[in-house]
Amino acid sequence: QSALTQPASVSGSPGQSITISCTGTSSDVGGYNYVSWYQQYPGKAPKLMIYEVSNRPSGVSNRFSGSKSGNTASLTISGLQAEDEGDYYCSSNRRPGTPWVFGGGTKLTVL
Amino acid sequence: DVQLVESGGGLVQPGGSLRLSCVASGFAFSNYWMNWVRQAPGKGLEWVANINQDESERYYVDSVRGRFTVSRDNTKNSLYLQLNSLRADDTAVYYCARSSDWSFDNWGQGTLVTVSS
């Protein structure tokens, strides 16, 4: 049950776009469209931002988008805002009954 | 609104036991898979266990299998996690999370479990 690989940190200035990558294998990220992304502020519970690779839940800003190529999924945040600063985690599942895996998390700093 | 409220955390000695609870409201609890996800202090998220709607399927991360047991009571809209043989590396905030569309779409606020002598 290996964790997915994310960069430890990314940063950007207000108004810019950033992308966070999430690399797995053909057995998880690459093999299924079950990638999701979560935003977490310090001391708070995670919040779902993207599900099934590229779908946004109701209420999530359209500045957040997701994609996938091969074994790597990506979260892109456009028009960066100060409120986007926090930790971001990807997650993937293979099929019903298999363990979920998370990425190690990426700390986003808005400069 | 969907609400998940965990309780039962606390300080326990190594080798001890705890039972965590999660009470759900605002949705048809019996229709959903439910999960426990934990986060050690200063660390990332780790999925711990999940259970299907009628308790016929339960899955665990390798590190807790045989020590933790997930269960639910649909009549009480409640999810449980029995933690036995606790170790220092089980210290974490434990979140209850609902599964939907291959994601964790709602989370509780978490309950802190500290394993220390």
Image: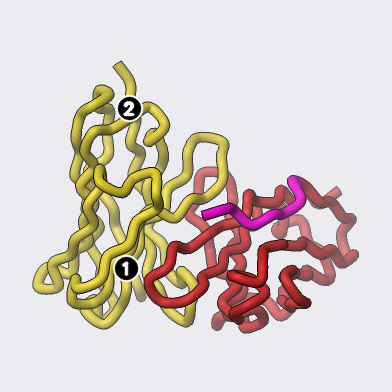
Residue A101 location (% of width, % of height): 53, 59
Stretch of the chain drawn in magenta: A1-8
**Dominant secondary structure of the magenta stretch?**
loop
Q: Residue at x 44, y 55 (%)?
A: B47
User: Distance from label 1 to label 2 (Cα)?
Assistant: 24 Å
- Judging depth in this view, the residue of A4 and A14 nearest the camera is A4
Going by the picture, which residue comes out furthest to the left? B75
On the image, numbered disc 2 is attached to which residue? B115
Q: Residue at x 19, y 44 (%)?
A: B19
Q: Chain of mark 2?
A: B
The colour with which the image depicts chain A is red
Asked if the residue under mark 2 is in contact with the one under mark 1, i.e. CB atoms within 8 Å, the reply is: no
Looking at marks 1 and 2 on the same chain, the residue that comes earlier in the sequence is marked by: 1
Helix, strand, or loop for circle 1?
strand
Amino acid type at image mark 1: Met
Residue B22 location (% of width, % of height): 25, 57
The colour with which the image depicts chain B is yellow
Amino acid type at image mark 2: Val
Residue A4 in magenta stretch: yes
Where is residue B75, by image quadrant?
bottom left
Q: Which mark is residue B34?
A: 1
Q: Chain of mark 1?
A: B
Q: Quadrant of the N terminus of chain B?
A: bottom left
For residue A35, above or below residue B67: below
